[in-house]
Image (cartoon, rainbow, N blue to C red):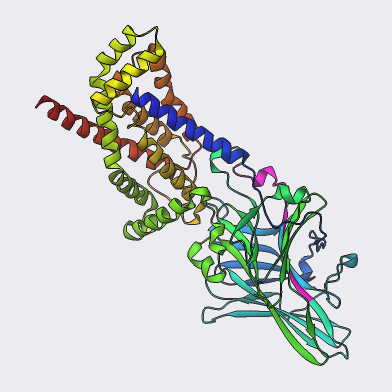
Amino acid sequence: MEVQRNFFIFIFLFVSFFLWQEWQSQSFSDVHKNEKNSINFNSSKKNYKNQIIIKNDVIRLVVNMYGGDIEEASLLAYKEKLNSPKPLKLLETASDFIYQAQSGLIGKDGPDNMENDHRPLYHAKNHFFELENNQKELRVPISFTKDNNIVYTKTFVLKPGKYDIEVEYNINNLSHNDLQLRMFGQLNQTIQLPKKRDIYSGNFALKTFRGAAYSSLDTKYEKYKFNNILKNEQLHILTKSGWVAMLQQYFSVAWIPEEDVNLNTIYTSCVNQKIATIGYKSSSFNVPSNSQAVVKSKLWIGPAIQKDMVLVAPNLNLTVDYGWLWFLSQPLFKLLSVLYNIVGNWGISIVLITFIMKAITYPLTKAQYISMAKMRQLQPKINEIKKNFRNNKQRMSQEMMSLYKRKKINPLGGCLPVFIQMPIFLSLYYMLIGSVELRHAPFVLWIKDLAAQDPYYVLPIIMGITMFFIQKTSLNNISDPLQQKIMHFMPVVFTVFFLWFPSGLVLYYIISNLVTIIQQKMILLNFQKKSLK
């Protein structure tokens, strides 16, 4: 009965997890509902004559000169799809989808006047700017002159190999009046993802969080669903530090304001029930007459690479969301990275990490199979107790517990490895679908992407065969024909589940099963030898 119980426990935990993942709802603190925060501009204006292109070796930006907003961003080192020649377009402005990074100066004297959708029209010397090989940084200034005596210069600063962009405003106030301004940065994205863009719409196993997130002085990292924004449950958080972001699988975009002596305001809003916005507003600052002022902000547009993000802003690396098992997934990823640096293949690294995990859990596995072997030896006596006390369930339980006690057997001893294996399995799952390093990472032959499902379903079928073999060698403890049929059916159920799982996770489970088969044979053979002595 040990294997039967273990399988049912695993199935219960397995199914419960994915039901919880699908339906879980988040609770959030520090939220003031229905407060007006919105900075809304027309996000769909597109005029190629009023655009400039800024490029370094890893990112290409398209900037709309009306407001100086980034309307497109392509990641040159990442492909749109496996084997596609097109780079991944993270930010874009299309008829059916908008994802933009906006910034500007508002307040009493701000040029980004929210009334009548007015934005300043900036000017630049050229239409194309590219970081040269010998340059340490690329500075692209665009300027706007108001009333011939106030000059606003917005400068984009890019560095080689970097995904963080500095956005700098220089305000040269040559007027006779003081200016009161506030800087803002916000991210706009269409809430409903078009079906043609949702590559995981039919795959429950590869779906990850898509929505907003923020960090503040009191909260290191908090996700905020688009549904909350849509329901008008808007954020209004005052903080001296932090950031705002929008997340999706493998990639993120985040505004990181300067740490202000006063307070920045983190806010969310919804435009026409279609576009979600998360952003920040700096506190008001003064630019005296005949003087200059400079305000800055950073913008991350790129892959969620933890070691790079943590250098840009505190807690920004937490946007690589490993779920509630982050304390296991993070060290597992670090170990996997070490193995990858040695062998140079993520698939082989997964095989090696499986061996390491099985070696660590070997004492528990040994205890499990020894417990199973002892239970098998006691099966005739257990059947006799069941026969003698079939009409007295309470007495039957008492006699069986007494038998276990005399033989020093824990009937639940075989369950512990299942409870240990499940967190490891889930932490690997989170790691595989959350780490951009594994995106489009090949293994061998037809496995070209360890983070995607097996295109030919070969690995899930092999996994089902190994599971069936493990089960077949342990069915002697199950005498009921109906229970045997149910257990025979379980590998089929798991195979169907695993059809949609990342191939790297299925690979882990195959190797784990193969090692389990070897360990099972060794442990039971040694036990039999000791029993004959």
Position of 235 relative to 470 (above/below): below
Which residue does the image show at 21% across and 33% down from the upper left? 523
Name, please, the residue furthest toward the right.
116
Judge whether residue 259 is colored magenta.
no
What count of labels does the image hold? 0
Q: Position of residue 412 (x, y in %)?
A: 35, 30
306 lies above or below 402: below
Quarter of the view holding residue 517:
top left
**Which sits in the foreground, 467 or 283?**
283
Q: Is residue 156 visible?
A: yes
**In the current view of this chain or complex, which residue is farthest to the left?**
533
* Res. 116 image quadrant: bottom right
Q: Position of residue 247 (x, y in %)?
A: 62, 55
Q: Toward the viewer: 396 or 319?
A: 396
- Split into 4 quadrants, where in the image is the N terminus? top left
Q: Answer whether residue 185 is magenta in the image.
A: yes
Q: Which residues are magenta?
A: 182-200
- Work out whether residue 450 can be spotted: no
Q: Is residue 459 above or below residue 27?
A: above
Give me the residue at 54% from left, 59% from top. Answer: 318
**Residue 252 placement (x, y as % from top left):** 60, 59
| Residue 85 falls left or right of residue 337 | right
Q: Position of residue 197 (x, y in %)?
A: 65, 47
At x 16%, y 32%, the residue is 526
Q: Nearer the viewer, residue 258 or 100?
A: 258
- Name the quarter where the C terminus is drawn: top left
